[in-house]
Image (cartoon, grey):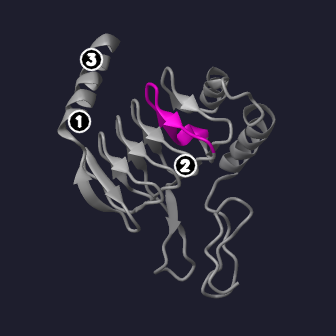
Amino acid sequence: MIGAPPARQGEGSRSLGADGAYRPSPHSRANKIARLAWGSVWLLLFRPSPKPFHAWRRMLLRLFGAEIGPGAVIHASARIWAPWNLTMGTCASLSHRVDCYAVDLISIGDYATVSQYSFLCAASHDIDAPDMPLVTAPIVICAHAWVAADAFVGPGVTIGEGAVVGARASVFRAVPPWTVVAGNPARAIRMRRPAVAAAEATWHVEDRRRAT
């Protein structure tokens, strides 16, 4: 179909080469089997779990290699492509229907929040190559940051500590700490209020002290 975006690699799709031949998926057989197993667990045990069962969902993700901190909140409708590429800190949150396309590493820091319908996309395609091969890069969302509803965060992006990504923003480059960005492509619109930044920084220091 003209104008259609490339389908996700490794989900039944293969890229079309310059010679018209289809290229095999870049994902290993082991990767595909692991994702098939996780998909079954997500469908049968994760997705139907009641809203308060965050500990149950944390346990399931850890069984598949995710690093999940204490008190992390993962809603049942959140989609995680490969749990072994996911790291979440203390009380970090993935809200309803977040799509965590963790082809590469995705790290969500302590007390960071990713709101409903957001898309964390750690992969894309090299559009300058004839067969458009899959390319990946990690996403880092630092402590106390907030990715608001329906935002898109692209591969290789770091959202700095305490930063805010506005609703429906599309982020393709790093966001400095304590900065508010909005729009498509996202642009800085202001800094967070100093009192909020100072308070959250203090909470972060106190949390680390308690942890030690």
Q: Is residue 113 left or right of residue 3?
A: left
For disc 3, the neighbor class at 10 Å (few under 14, some 14 to 19, many from 20) is few
Residues rendered magenta in the picture: 83-96
Q: Nearer the viewer, residue 121 or 148?
A: 148
In the figure, is residue 211 to the left or right of 54? left
Q: Amino acid at mark 2?
A: Ala
User: Counting residues from the N terminus, which is met first, the one under dot 1 or under dot 2?
Assistant: 2
**Residue 150 or residue 13, whichever sits in front:** 150
The residue under label 3 is 206
Point 23% across, 24% down: residue: 202
Q: Which mark is residue 197?
A: 1
Q: Nearer the viewer, mark 1 or mark 2?
A: 1
Q: CA distance from mark 1 to mark 3?
A: 14 Å
Q: Secondary structure at mark 1?
A: helix
Instruction: Locate the C terminus by quadrant.
Output: top left
- Vertical comparison of 196 with 7: above or below: above
The quadrant of the picture occupied by the N terminus is bottom right
Mark 1 or mark 3: name the one nearer the start of the chain: 1
Of tags 2 and 3, the one toward the viewer is 3
| Residue type, numbered disc 1 | Ala
Mark 2 or mark 3: whose residue is earlier in sequence = 2
Q: Find residue 102 and report its horizontal and vertical position in percent.
A: 55, 49
Mark 2 highlights which residue? 102
Does the magenta segment cover residue 88?
yes
